[in-house]
Amino acid sequence: MPKAHPAARAEDAVNGIVARRLRKRGWQQQVLPYMGYAGEGFARVLARVVLGRDGQPTTAPAAEEAPIRRGFKVFFTAPLAGVDVQVRFGAASATATTDRGGYLDVELRDHGLAPGRQHATVTVGDLTVEAPIEVIGPETRFGIISDVDDTCLVTALPRPMIAAWNSFVLEETARKVVPGMPAMYRSLLADHPGAPIIYLSTGAWNTQPILTRFLRRHGFPLGPALLTDWGPTDDSIFRSGQEHKRTSLRRLAREFPHIQWLLVGDDGQHDPVIYEDFAVEHPDNVACIAIRQLTVTQQLLSHGHPLVRDELRGRPLRMIVCEGPDGFTLHRLVRKALVQESGTRSDADA
């Protein structure tokens, strides 16, 4: 087996030293459950095992209960690698081991549970917590996949200095919502009962509690968030956010072949090209693409010049692409596009 990247080995060594010292101070194992998702016959359970102070809550508090915090605090964690974990969801169960970052990503089969909000149990030693799971029914034909940064909330990513200020220094209540986006998502999901929403971001799992509270605070519908680990990989010092999104989209297409997704992103990063590539590869899994257009100022803060970072390449697509500066404009365009797409499918079926 090839050696891990030096940066990964250094990170593992630091994490080991921190864990040993915190254990001596009485810190104990804790499980941080994340919302997962499931389909007919399978479930994906997500969690993380870390060290925490005795009595520290293991789940993110509700928005109204959350203390006002600065973002940098969520990045000070003590992950536990190589911990054995027992996972149970309905009739399915499995034993798994946490990875280098203390993360757990387990797929279970034949759970036998009905569609809707369910819970898996994650057990580490004497500690058992519940992880929420959104079970998506086989009759579901529509869903939303949404980017987060500069799509749901204004972060001015990925320019490093601006991103660092917004993510590490600002208090979480200072983050601004993109106008109209919560209302758009609530309205579209109300039109499609049982439809899921999945937040797909290149953000770190460390920010998940802040993200969850932000979504609650501003009225976004809750759904699973697919984030990334913060730190080096076994073969690279930096993780590829684009590859994370591409891999996640392909996995969702494979897991839910019956769903057509509304893909929502912004033109400040690489969402237009990523979504277009996915639409070309999986045209039957895309109902519409919606791109939030950043202002000139936001483009300048995001990557140092006022021009759009990435644009659609103009390849022929079967679905409509909607572009607008906010959720109000996108909502109007997307509703028209979905009605048109529905009519096209009906004509084809006839």
Image: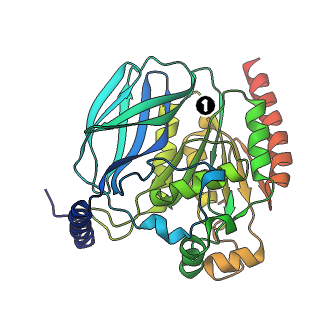
Q: Quadrant of the N terminus?
A: bottom left
Q: Is residue 221 visible?
A: yes
Q: State the image coordinates of residue 197 (x, y, percent, origin top left).
A: 63, 40
Q: Nearer the viewer, residue 119 or 69?
A: 69
| Residue 53 located left or right of residue 152 | left
Q: Amino acid at mark 1?
A: Ile
Note whether 244 is above or below 9 in the view shown.
above
Q: Quadrant of residue 343?
A: top right
Q: Is residue 315 visible?
A: no
- Label 1 sits on a secondary structure element that is loop
Note whether 171 is above or below 348 in the view shown.
below
Q: Nearer the viewer, residue 30 or 310?
A: 30
Q: Residue at point 61% right, 48% down?
A: 62
Q: State the image coordinates of residue 104 (x, y, percent, origin top left).
A: 34, 45
Q: Which residue is mark 1?
A: 259
- How crowded is the residue under tag 1: few (<14 C-alpha within 10 Å), some, or many (20+)? many
Q: Quadrant of the C terminus?
A: top right
| Residue 330 located left or right of residue 242 | right
Q: Residue at point 59% right, 51% down?
A: 212
